[in-house]
Every structure is written in C-alpha cells, then in structure tokens.
C-alpha cells in the first residue's frame, strides 16, 4: 500500500499477532495461511503525539485527551460532552481548519460506562488532514448537536439517533430517518437481536404460511410432505431457521453464526 | 337527384369510412414506426416478436388495450372523465375531413375529390377544431382529481394556447401568398406560382414546424406528459381503451399537423417542381402518393427529434414561444406584406 | 489538493454566435449523429431466442458434485446469508469411505452468488455453474436438493 | 384577495425520476418548489448490523449491495480498511489490477449516471447509448470478477482470482475506443441549447456550502472546490499514476455534468496506465484465512468512489467479526443537498437536481 501507516501507534502491534495466531481457523485451503510477516513492531517508548493532537491539547489542555492514532494514522482525541461544542467550533475555525464533517456515528460498548461513544470524523478540505473526535454518551443522555457548526451533521446525527438512540441536544429535527417513526428499539445496539425484536410475530406469519395459506398460493401443485421436509422451513417464510427441522419449530433463535 | 345523393352523401360517407378505417390502422403503425425508429437510433431493434419484425405489433397492442380493465378512479368526475378522451379524438378526426390527400380520382363517372370537405375557410376551421383538443386534455387532467394530471393539464392548456398564436402567424404568412383559406386553394396557388411556399417562406416554415411539435405535445415539448416529471401528465389515471383514445388523438393530431405543413409549405400533393416540364414523368406517381410521402417525412421528423433532444422545461417553453417565435413570426409577416406590396 | 492547474476558471458553457444559434447548428449536428446511428448495426440480443454465452468465470446457479462431497460443512459455515444446509454422515454407502452428505439443499432465493462456498470447498465439490436462468414459479422450487444440485435443475427454455 | 394554498406533491417512492425508492414531499406554489421533505429508508437492510455478525470475508458481498452501481469501489473501500486494520500488504499486481477494475467501475457508474440523468431531462437516446458501453464494462467484470453487478470483487490482500487470459488486451482496446464514444455523447448534449437551458444555473450550491453540507466527489468539484481524495490522500497506488482532476467553477448541474464527463476520460487514462504498470506475479490475497482483529483496533479509511467520499469505519472486536462497521455513504451525505438546491426551482428542476446528485438508494439507505 502506498500509505502504509508509518507512524504505528501503541495499538498496532497488538493487532498483528491476533491476526496470525489462528492457523486452525475454519480452514480454507492451507496454501496462504500465513500472513505477511508483520512489520516489525516498533515499541516506541514515548509515542510522539500527532501534530494535530498536539495543537488541540495545546489549545484546550485537559479538556481533550489524546487517544493515539488509528490504523490509518488518523489522530483520535476524546472530549467531554460539556466541552464538545467549544472544541468543535475551534476545530472548524481555528488553525486546524477542519471544515468538513465526514461522518458521525456511535459505538455501543454495552458494559462500559458511559455506554456509547459518539464518534466524529473530521477532515480539512485544503489542508488534507483528518481527526477523529470521540465523546462518551450514557444511554438516555445526549451530546450537543453539531448542526450549527457543520450543517452536514443534520442527517448524520439523525441517522445515529435512529440506529443507536443517542440523543443530540439542540438538534432542530431529531426524528428517525431510516426506520418508521413508530419503530421500537435501536437496531445497531448490541442487545438488539439481528433479526429484529418482533421475532414471535414473524414466526407466526411463517407458521401461517406453512399451514394453510402457502398451499393456497401454490394452487394445484400442493407441496407434499416429503418435499416440504426436504425444502425445510427457510423456504417459505421470510426467515431462516438454523436447524434442520425435526418437527414444527415454533421458536426461533436469532442467528448465532459468527460467534 | 341520384347524382346529388351520390355526390353529397354516398361519396363523403365512403370517404369517411375509408379514412377512418385506414387511420385506425395507420395510427397503430405510426406507433410501431416510432418504436422502430427510436430503437434504430438507440442501437436496438425494437419490437420483433409479433409477426415478422414486429409488423403485427399494433394489432396485438390494440387487442391488449381493448381487453384491459377500464379503471375509473373513485374520486373522479365520471362524466367528464369519460367524455374527455372522446373530445380529443373527435376533434382530431374532424380536422382530417378538411385535408386534401390528392387531386381526386374519377370512378364510375363520378369525380371523387381528394378531400372530404373542401371548405373555403378550411385552414381556419382546422386550427379552430384542433384547438378543441385542449379542452379534452384539460378536462381529462382535471376530472381525474389527482395531482399529477392536474399539473399536466395546466401545462397543456398554457402551452397549446400560446403556441397556437405562433402557429397561426406562421400560417398567415403562407396564406398571404396563397390568397385563400381553402386547403385545396392553397395547393393550387402553389401550382400557379410554380414554387412550393417553403422556398419563399422558410422562416414561416421553421416557426410552423417548431410550433406544430409543441402544439401536438410531442418531445421536446411534451410538457403535458413529461413521464420523468409528471409520470404521464394528464392521462396518468387513464387506462385501457380510454388511454388508447388519448394516444389515438395525439397521433392523429400529429398526422393532421404534418398534413397542414405539407399542404401549406411543401406543395400538398404536387410533385417536385410542378411546372418544370422536364420532370413530367414524375406525374406517373399518383398525387396521393406524393402527399403521403411528404407526410411520412414529417412524421419521421417528429420521431427523429424525439430521439435526439432532451425536454424543455415548462417556463422555458413559454419563453421560447413568447420571446422568440411570436416576435419572429410577426416580423416575418410584416416583411412578407411589404415585399408583396412592392412586387404587386 | 490536486496538482493540476485546473483552478483557473474554465468557461464551462460553449459560446455560440448569433448565426449558429439562429440556424440551430448544434441541434442539427445532434440530429445528423442520430441519423447516422439509425443505419448502424444494432447491439441488442433477442433474448429468449438468442442467448449470449457467459464467461466461464461467471457465477451462476450453484451445483454440487455429490460423488466428491466430503460433508465438511465449510460451505455452510462460510455462506454469508446461510442459504446452504447440509448434514453429513460417516459411512461407506457410496463406494467411498469417510463422510458424505445425506441432506443437502441450497435456497437459491436467498443466495448472494458471492462464490465464497466455491472458494472454501476443499474438494471443489460445490461450484457455480454458468447457468443463469433460475426463475421459478414458486419459492419452494428455488430450493435445490442434492438430486437437483448434482444433476442440474430443469430449465424451461423458451420455444417459438 | 383569493386565498392560495400550498400544494403538496408526493414524488416517490414510486416515481420514474427518483432513482429508486426515494420519496420527496414537495411543497409547491404553482410549480415552484417552496420546500422539500426527504423521506428515505425504504431500502434499509441493516447492512451495518449484518456486518457485525459476519466475519471479515463474509462481509464483502454485503458491500456490493450498498452502492450497487459501483460495487468494486465499495469492495475496495471495505477491503482496504480491513487491510489497514490487519496491516496486510497487497502485491503490486493486485494493486494495479484493483485500480484498473475500480476505475472501470467509475466509468460504468458515470455512464449509468449520464444515462439516467439525460433520460430524466428527456434525452432518452442517451440511456441506450450509455448502457451499451456500460454493458462492455460489465462483461469485463463478468470475466474477471465472476459477476456483473454484485461483483464481490476483492478480498483482503488482493483479488479472488487472477485476471483471465486476454482480459488486459480487451480492456485496453475498449479504452482506445471509449473516448470517441464520450465525444458522441457530448455532440448530443454539450452545446445543445435545451440541455444547457435545463442544466445551466440549476441546482446551484456554492463551494463553501458544499463543504459545510458534507458534499463530496463531483458535487464538490462541480462547485469549484479542487478536491479529490485520490490526489489529496492517495490510497491504493493512485499516487503512481498520472491523471487530472477536472474542476468547474459554475456550481450548477452543467458544471457537474462536465466534471463527470471529463472524469470518464481521466479514468480511461488511469486504466491504461494501471494495466501498463501491472507486473506479473501473485494476485490473490496474502491475508490469513481467518482474519482476527484485536479488540479496540480501529480505522476510518476513505476512498473516492464515483459518488464521492466513501468511508468505512471499522473496529476490531478480538474475534473474527468486526465489532463495528460504519459505512460513510457518499449518496446519503450528498442527498442532503436536495433541499437547499431545489428551493425556488420548478418541479422539472427537482428531477434535474436528483439526477445531478447521482444517488444510489442502496447507498443512501444501506
């Protein structure tokens, strides 16, 4: 890669062994099982703060904390919700000229306190540098809205609210954006099941399908028992049932693959 | 008495019957031709499945349209909703009676003229009746009681009323040369002068051609339909046969406008250079064929333009008319008058 | 920022003289182009009658070679949308030892055609055929069991 | 005085010009647009949630289905992010093969944009001419990647299979003839007075507003902002090829049209250079068969997709599945401009504005 992160932060070496130590992995062809030899970890005793971070901490001192860099070499800082507006305003208008809000999102660390991180990815059109700003957010609380600083935040914050349920205080129009207004729950939270909270309802629909109505749809070519067993329940309804059917599977578990 | 009956009743009825019979088919084939030509322009083949090279497609289409369910929206004004496509088609068909298709032939000792009714205010009547089409479109859009058709109808009304002005001024220039309002008379005037009016009135012809495309709601002036904005415009809610009637009306109107254009500027049924004796062998081709050939060319032009240009916006369309075409046509009229006065 | 000198304003709109405007020059140019195209060879294929062949690399409908399948479950595991289902048994029924699939079906209505199963299969038993006509009249027919997967599904070719 | 009422018009979700299932509620005064409400989400499939439950290889097919008109670019964005997370190297051959493929996808995407944009404005012939060329590119994808639209082109570390025999020559031949085709499109549109009246001065957004609204890609460059991530933060070997970034200052739909037309030419150049530079060697991936990223390792990687800044923000979770995968969709951010850009215009211009933004609803809703 052209811009392989040259200034590896402390986090980098941690990634490499983890990536490699898994030879018994769900084996595919063993040919290329070994990864690139990891670039020699450079355990710098005292990692130099990124100049962007340095400028920021120079301006705000303790209000922002340095969180190193990500794998692309983008500095990460953390700010408190109370100082966020002040910090962000300076980032846009100050020396760093971070005039472009690239993305807003949140991360759900279910057990951590505060539960969410609201993450802002900033960019400077002109200076070509990036900055990631994180801000903790407890469930049910909120962080100040950035709409006044970057109009781009309008929909991005609505999206984050829609999917994570993090409030953005002062947002002029904080509604759901993708999901219907009466949707329950916030899908990207970790405790939200993959196939949705209305699993029971869907199962009933599926049962109805499998019972009488499905045959009606098929008309004369009514599906015979053997064929149905062969086809399995996943065919008929919208949902997949993980186990091959022993008999009527009324209860379904969320998809467990991937664990 | 018999002669009177034959000349005034039987012959016109037969003419009407033949014309309508041919026209029903012809419209279908204009649609097919349009699909084919557009396809050729766009590097594809167009309808190929029904009959050889899709030649039976119009029949399949009309059958489909007749058999389709005829929906009337619940909230529509039913009477007007049903009436408006009929208005459009009736107006378009009526104008056909006034168009001279040829010199006429003599059959069983009776001269059958090439026109059903040679009225001495022919062209005025055509413009007047075709103006009625607007009512059908407005009523159709309004009676659907739906938003897109309403917008389409509004556009259609404004557009057709405005372009009629430019159209009429362009026609006037030709009429001044001809000195008559009769469609047959116009052609005969060109025969007398020995020159088609296109060569003396090119500007009027240009204006007429642009205005005629706009007047028939065809691309790039198909504001009223504008399927990418108004999803079909005034006939969004129509389906089946009623929708087909609008279609029939549109294509008949195209035919009529092309016929007027040919009659007025391209010598109607006359062969090229009607007074040059050296080309007399061209008279072997019947006059009706010359006429149809010219009309076909214009119909091709319609399709060709549709395949080439993007669509104007509603306000730009009006600006084009009021700011360019109408002033230009008035100027043209003035110049024509002055020159004729000087030459007279 | 780019290194080009494109910051200099480029007159984006082409300029036209009055005569060019009045004589509709650019419109006539366009019409000339479309007229030329009217007579050029056409590029479309009359689909149900003619069929274009696809490249051998094309990922079409999944097929399984029953005789080589060792029932290792890798395809089922890697499938991102879980459309492959199989059960394997140990035995000698089919003239070979080891595991073999007793129960194998693929729901093509859910398949992503991503090719991951083909890639992980250690014996190249599951593979994408070049067949792309998978339309069926009811959803149950989109599910191919081992018999169909092995011998190929019936394609109703359009006649006439 | 007559009482006048605001006219509310539902445009979409089923409308020929909303390019999918976008719904705009237009508040009209006559035909003049006073305000636009944008309603979306009809195509929301929860891709980001799905990505949190599938492993790093399994996620590649999902990225196809976000911006399905330029699927290889989405694959590239995702795969490069994973490579950054794991620190995997890409072979030279894979690097340039990828570059050629994604630039072809940019051409294909812009072609389809032109086709639909011109169709919306009423030039229906463009639809067929553009899809004709796009079809050729899709054939290349079919041969090299296995599928035409949902390519699942790359995997972490490289490509999934080597390029087929004769592929490079065929692509180079296409690159030789393609600029002439672009010229033909321009004959039909560039100077056409109707096209100009429909696009010049329509959908104006100034450079500053565009940056503040988070617009990217041709939306920025059509507003006079000289910014292209391929130049600004080179990734994927773009710093080794020579190309120009077209910038037009008029901030209107016509500028953006010119930008995209020129980008098609520049992409052709990049493809030619990339294929010339592509060495022999191994093209398939060097990443481990089971990618595991340590907990807390994160990366936000952006690429310049045909629509603009496409970003992937991923966090490793210590397992073989990402803890978080956020897709920064260019269509979504660009679509924010539809309100500001279409205020005061007519209905027909809203169609132009939607077309000029070049949205893909799969990308907007994810």
Image: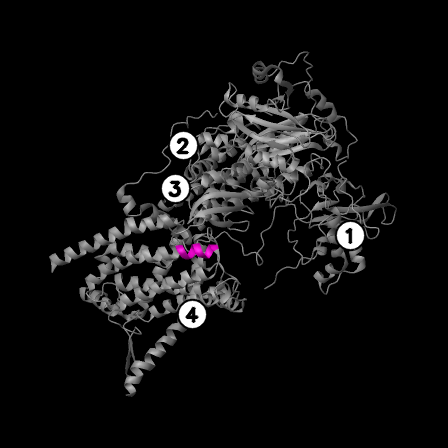
Do the residues marked 2 and 4 share a common chain?
no
Do the residues marked 3 and 4 share a common chain?
no
Q: Secondary structure at mark 4?
A: helix
Q: Secondary structure at mark 3?
A: loop
Is residue C141 in sight in this rendering? yes
Disc 3 to disc 1, how far (Cα)? 57 Å
Do the residues marked 1 and 2 share a common chain?
no
| Residue carrying label 4 | B24
The chain carrying label 1 is A
Residue furthest bottom as drawn: B1
| Residue carrying label 2 | D249
Please tell me the numbered disc located at residue A232.
Answer: 1
Compare residues D3 and B151 and report the one nearer the observer: D3
Disc 3 to disc 4, how far (Cα)? 40 Å
Rate crowding at label 4 as few (under 14), some (14 to 19) or many (20 or more) other CA atoms within 10 Å. Answer: few
Please tell me the numbered disc located at residue D190.
Answer: 3
Please tell me the numbered disc located at residue B196.
Answer: none
The label nearer to you, 2 versus 4, is: 2
Residue located at (55% from left, 29% from top)? A101
Q: Which residues are magenta?
A: B147-154
Q: Please identify the quarter of the rendering in which residue D105 is found.
A: top right
Do the residues marked 3 and 2 share a common chain?
yes
The label nearer to you, 1 versus 2, is: 2
* Quadrant (top left, top right, bottom left, bottom right) of the C terminus of chain C: bottom right
Q: Give coordinates of residue D11: x percent, y percent.
A: 51, 49
Compare residues A56 and C150 and report the one nearer the observer: A56
Left or right position of B121 against B36: left
Circles 3 and 2 in contact, beta carbons < 8 Å? no
Circles 3 and 4 in contact, beta carbons < 8 Å? no
């Amino acid at each position: 890669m052209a811009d392989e992160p040259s200034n590896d932060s402390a986090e980098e070496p941690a990634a490499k062994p983890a990536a490699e130590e898994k030879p018994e992995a769900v084996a595919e062809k063993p040919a290329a099982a070994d990864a690139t030899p990891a670039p020699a970890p450079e355990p710098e005793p005292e990692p130099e703060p990124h100049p962007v971070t340095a400028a920021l901490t120079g301006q705000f001192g303790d209000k922002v904390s340095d969180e190193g860099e990500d794998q692309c070499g983008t500095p990460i800082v953390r700010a408190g919700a109370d100082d966020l507006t002040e910090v962000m305003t300076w980032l846009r208008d100050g020396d760093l000229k971070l005039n472009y809000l690239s993305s807003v999102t949140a991360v759900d660390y279910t057990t951590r306190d505060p539960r969410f991180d609201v993450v802002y990815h900033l960019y400077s059109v002109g200076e070509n540098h990036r900055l990631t700003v994180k801000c903790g957010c407890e469930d049910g609380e909120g962080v100040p809205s950035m709409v006044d600083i970057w109009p781009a935040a309008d929909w991005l914050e609505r999206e984050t609210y829609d999917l994570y349920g993090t409030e953005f205080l002062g947002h002029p129009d904080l509604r759901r954006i993708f999901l219907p207004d009466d949707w329950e729950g916030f899908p990207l939270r970790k405790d939200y099941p993959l196939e949705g909270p209305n699993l029971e309802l869907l199962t009933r629909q599926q049962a109805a399908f499998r019972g009488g109505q499905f045959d009606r749809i098929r008309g004369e070519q009514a599906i015979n028992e053997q064929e149905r067993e062969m086809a399995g329940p996943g065919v008929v309804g919208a949902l997949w049932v993980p186990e091959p059917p022993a008999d009527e599977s009324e209860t379904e578990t969320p998809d467990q693959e991937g664990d | 008495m018999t002669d009177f009956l034959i000349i005034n009743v039987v012959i016109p009825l037969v003419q009407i019957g033949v014309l309508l019979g041919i026209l029903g088919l012809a419209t279908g084939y204009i649609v097919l031709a349009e699909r084919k030509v557009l396809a050729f322009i766009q590097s594809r083949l167009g309808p190929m499945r029904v009959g050889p090279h899709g030649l039976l497609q119009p029949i399949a289409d009309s059958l489909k349209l007749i058999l389709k369910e005829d929906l009337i929206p619940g909230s529509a004004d039913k009477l007007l909703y049903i009436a408006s496509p009929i208005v459009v088609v009736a107006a378009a068909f009526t104008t056909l009676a006034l168009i001279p298709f040829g010199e006429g032939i003599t059959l069983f000792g009776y001269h059958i003229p090439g026109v059903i009714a040679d009225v001495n205010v022919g062209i005025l009547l055509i413009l007047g009746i075709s103006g009625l089409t607007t009512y059908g479109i407005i009523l159709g859009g309004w009676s659907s009681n739906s938003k897109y058709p309403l917008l389409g109808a509004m556009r259609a009304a404004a557009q057709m009323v405005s372009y009629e002005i430019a159209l009429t001024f362009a026609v006037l220039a030709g009429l001044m040369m001809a000195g008559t309002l009769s469609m047959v008379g116009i052609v005969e005037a060109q025969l007398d002068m020995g020159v088609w009016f296109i060569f003396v009135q090119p500007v009027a012809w240009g204006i007429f051609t642009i205005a005629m495309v706009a007047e028939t709601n065809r691309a790039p002036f198909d504001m009223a339909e504008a399927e990418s904005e108004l999803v079909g415009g005034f006939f969004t809610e129509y389906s089946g046969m009623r929708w087909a009637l609008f279609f029939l009306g549109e294509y008949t109107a195209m035919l009529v406008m092309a016929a007027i254009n040919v009659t007025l500027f391209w010598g109607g049924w006359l062969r090229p250079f009607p007074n040059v004796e050296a080309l007399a062998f061209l008279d072997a081709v019947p006059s009706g064929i010359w006429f149809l050939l010219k009309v076909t060319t214009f119909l091709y032009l319609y399709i060709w333009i549709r395949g080439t240009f993007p669509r104007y916006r509603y306000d730009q369309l009006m600006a084009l008319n009021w700011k360019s075409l109408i002033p230009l046509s008035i100027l043209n009229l003035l110049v024509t008058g002055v020159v004729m006065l000087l030459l007279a | 920022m780019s290194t080009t000198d494109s910051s200099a304003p480029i007159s984006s709109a082409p300029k036209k003289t009055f005569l060019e405007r009045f004589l509709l020059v650019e419109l006539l140019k366009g019409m000339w182009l479309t007229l030329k195209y009217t007579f050029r060879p056409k590029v479309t294929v009359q689909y149900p009658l003619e069929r274009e062949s696809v490249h051998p690399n094309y990922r079409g409908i999944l097929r399984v070679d029953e005789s080589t399948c060792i029932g290792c479950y890798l395809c089922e595991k890697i499938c991102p949308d879980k459309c492959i289902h199989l059960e394997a048994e140990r035995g000698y029924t089919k003239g070979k030892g080891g595991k073999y699939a007793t129960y194998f079906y693929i729901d093509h209505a859910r398949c992503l055609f991503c090719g991951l199963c083909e890639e992980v299969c250690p014996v190249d038993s599951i593979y994408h055929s070049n067949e792309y006509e998978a339309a069926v009249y009811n959803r149950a027919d989109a599910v191919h069991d081992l018999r169909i997967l092995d011998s190929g599904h019936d394609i109703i070719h359009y006649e006439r | 005085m007559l009482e006048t009422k605001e006219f509310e018009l539902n445009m979409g979700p089923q409308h020929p010009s909303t390019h999918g299932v976008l719904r705009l509620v237009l508040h009209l005064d006559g035909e003049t647009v006073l305000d636009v409400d944008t309603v979306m989400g009809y195509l929301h499939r929860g891709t980001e949630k799905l990505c949190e439950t599938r492993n790093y290889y399994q996620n590649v097919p999902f990225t196809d289905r976000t911006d399905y008109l330029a699927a290889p670019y989405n694959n590239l964005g995702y795969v490069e992010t994973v490579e950054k997370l794991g620190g995997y190297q890409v072979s030279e051959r894979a690097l340039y093969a990828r570059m050629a493929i994604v630039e072809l996808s940019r051409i294909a995407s812009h072609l389809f944009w032109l086709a639909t944009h011109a169709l919306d404005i009423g030039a229906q012939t463009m639809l067929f001419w553009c899809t004709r060329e796009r079809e050729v590119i899709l054939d290349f994808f079919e041969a090299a990647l296995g599928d035409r639209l949902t390519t699942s082109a790359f995997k972490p570390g490289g490509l999934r299979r080597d390029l087929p025999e004769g592929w490079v020559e065929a692509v180079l031949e296409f690159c030789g003839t393609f600029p002439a085709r672009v010229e033909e499109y321009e004959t039909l549109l560039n100077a056409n007075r109707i096209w100009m009246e429909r696009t010049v001065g329509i959908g104006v957004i100034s450079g500053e507003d565009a940056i503040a609204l988070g617009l990217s890609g041709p939306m920025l460059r059509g507003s006079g902002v000289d910014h292209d991530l391929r130049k600004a933060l080179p990734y994927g070997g773009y710093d080794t090829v020579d190309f120009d970034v077209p910038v037009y200052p008029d901030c209107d739909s016509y500028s953006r049209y010119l930008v995209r037309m020129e980008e098609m030419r520049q992409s052709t150049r990049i493809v030619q250079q990339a294929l010339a530079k592509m060495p022999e060697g191994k093209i398939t991936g060097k990443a481990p068969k089971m990618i595991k990223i340590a907990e807390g390792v994160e990366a936000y990687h952006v690429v310049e997709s045909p629509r603009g800044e496409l970003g992937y923000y991923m966090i490793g979770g210590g397992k073989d599945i990402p803890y978080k995968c956020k897709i920064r969709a260019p269509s979504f951010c660009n679509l924010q401009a539809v309100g500001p850009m279409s205020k005061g215009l007519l209905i027909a211009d809203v169609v132009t504005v939607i077309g000029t933004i070049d949205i893909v609803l799969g990308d907007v809703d994810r």
